[in-house]
Image (cartoon, helix red, strand yellow):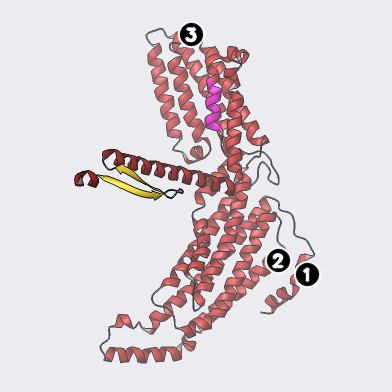
Amino acid sequence: MANKASSRLEWRINVPDGTSKVLELESGAVGKIWVGLKGCMAIIVWKVWKVLENAWHIGVADPRKVIHCIKVGLALTIVSLFYYMRPLYDDFGGNAMWAVMTVVVVFEYTVGATFYKCINRVIATFLAGALGVGIHLVAEQSGDQLKPIILGISVFLFASAATFSRFIPSVKARFDYGAMIFILTFSLVSVSGYRVVELFELAHLRLSTIAIGTSLCILVTMLFCPVWAGCELHHLIHQNMEKLADSLDGCVTEYFKENGSEEDLNKKMQGYKCVLNSKAAEESMANFARWEPTHGRFNFRHPWKQYLKIGASLRNCAYCIETLNSCISLEIQAPPCLRKHFSNKCMKASSYSINVLKELAITIMKMKKSSNIDVKVAEMNFAVEELVDALKSLPTTHFIATTTTGEESTKAKAEGVEGSEHPSPIMKVLPLVKVVSLMVEIATRIGGVVNAVEELARLAEFKAAEDGKPKQNQPTDKLVSDH
């Protein structure tokens, strides 16, 4: 009885009628398997829930992605009618599948990317098909024995040449997809044409179905909530300027304040990191924007390459801000008296630099020339000159602090303390000199951003600045001239 009782698990529960019942569950292999299955099911349900939750957040953050998915489904549904409707299927037959495949591979998120793939696919298919048919005719005139040799040599030569063209930077940037489609189509036409009798009809049907698929993709992506690569690039450059200004403000404020908040610093530091990591996105958007037709404020020949130059100038500034951020966590810091002495001048130079960046961001956003950018640049340059003058007078200012620190260092050596624990005065000054030098360099590189934006305004023919705005800045202009 004892063994029998020990092999069971029981629970006693109270029933509303006042009685009690005993629930018994046998422990063993079946119970363990059941518990394991319940655990696995719970884990699967939890993971599926997390995936759905992440998908929901992505859709809420950018509803255009959900709309893009609907557009792809709509395009595939329409092109599938070539299979579902008997009259259309009788005209195209099994070649209608090429229209479906075309929609799947060429429909992209932005209009420019879709145009890029559609145009490349149509041109590459037409060239490869025409070339394949021509070589097939030449091979047929050579006899049955030389026909496979000529076809094989042609496939080898043209496939090798097209593959090598993909290594050329200018070709890879704009026609990489077309080169791949050329290799695929030419190989299919050359190989299948060896056994197919009606090669012309086959080539005609495939080209027609591909043209139908690409035309449908272009219509759907342009008519239903279009996403333009040019607009995306324009907004990205504007956002990078705003993030760079916030990062510069956060770094300088964090360095010169006594009690810093690590959480606030990390939030502000994300800005320059986004600027540093945006090179690939900028190049991709600029490449796709070239294929887009005129839309909104952007003409067909809009200077998209100039946006890449602005992005490169912004990254040059971001590299300096990254170095400036590393100065905050250095073990050896300048004496508080020196940091307080340079605090106002560095904050002033930082403030004027931020004003220039934000003014440029407004210029980009509105596509309108600024009427007071010259005044803001002059203020920034004057603040930098004051900072440089303060740095030149550093030995006189630091004389008392150096003497005091030198006495402490001598006393520490007399007591046998290691020198690494008590840095020399020059080692304490160097971090502050580094920060000041970085501020000067950042201002210089912001000047490069100003030049790049002004060149964009000239090439894109931004609207002229209003005449009434500069009058509001006359006192500031006079102040700069007096200085």
Quarter of image, res 39: top left
Residue 102 among magenta residues: yes
Say above or below: 402 vs 97: below
The Cα–Cα distance between marks 2 and 3, rounded to whole angstroms, is: 73 Å
| Amino acid at dot 1 | Lys
Residue 68 among magenta residues: no
Say above or below: 420 vs 351: below
Q: Which residue is mark 3?
A: 197
- Residue 294, image x, y percentages: 68, 40
Residue that sits furthest to the right in the current view: 468
Query: Which of the marked residues, 1 or 2, is nearer the chain's N terminus?
Result: 2
Residue at point 56%, 51% (across, down): 308
Query: Which of the marked residues, 3 or 1, is nearer the chain's N terminus?
Result: 3
Residue that sits furthest to the front in the current view: 18
**Can the viewer see residue 122 in this picture?**
yes
Is 244 positioned to the left or the right of 368 in the image? left
Say above or below: 412 vs 196: below
Could you tell me which secondary element the residue under label 1 belongs to? helix
Residue 372: numbered disc: 2
| Amino acid at dot 2 | Asn
Quarter of image, res 141: top left
The magenta region covers 97-106
Please state which of residues 219 and 139 is positioned toward the viewer in this rendering.
219
The Cα–Cα distance between marks 1 and 2, rounded to whole angstroms, is: 10 Å
Main SS of residues in magenta: helix
Query: Which of the marked residues, 2 or 3, is nearer the chain's N terminus?
Result: 3
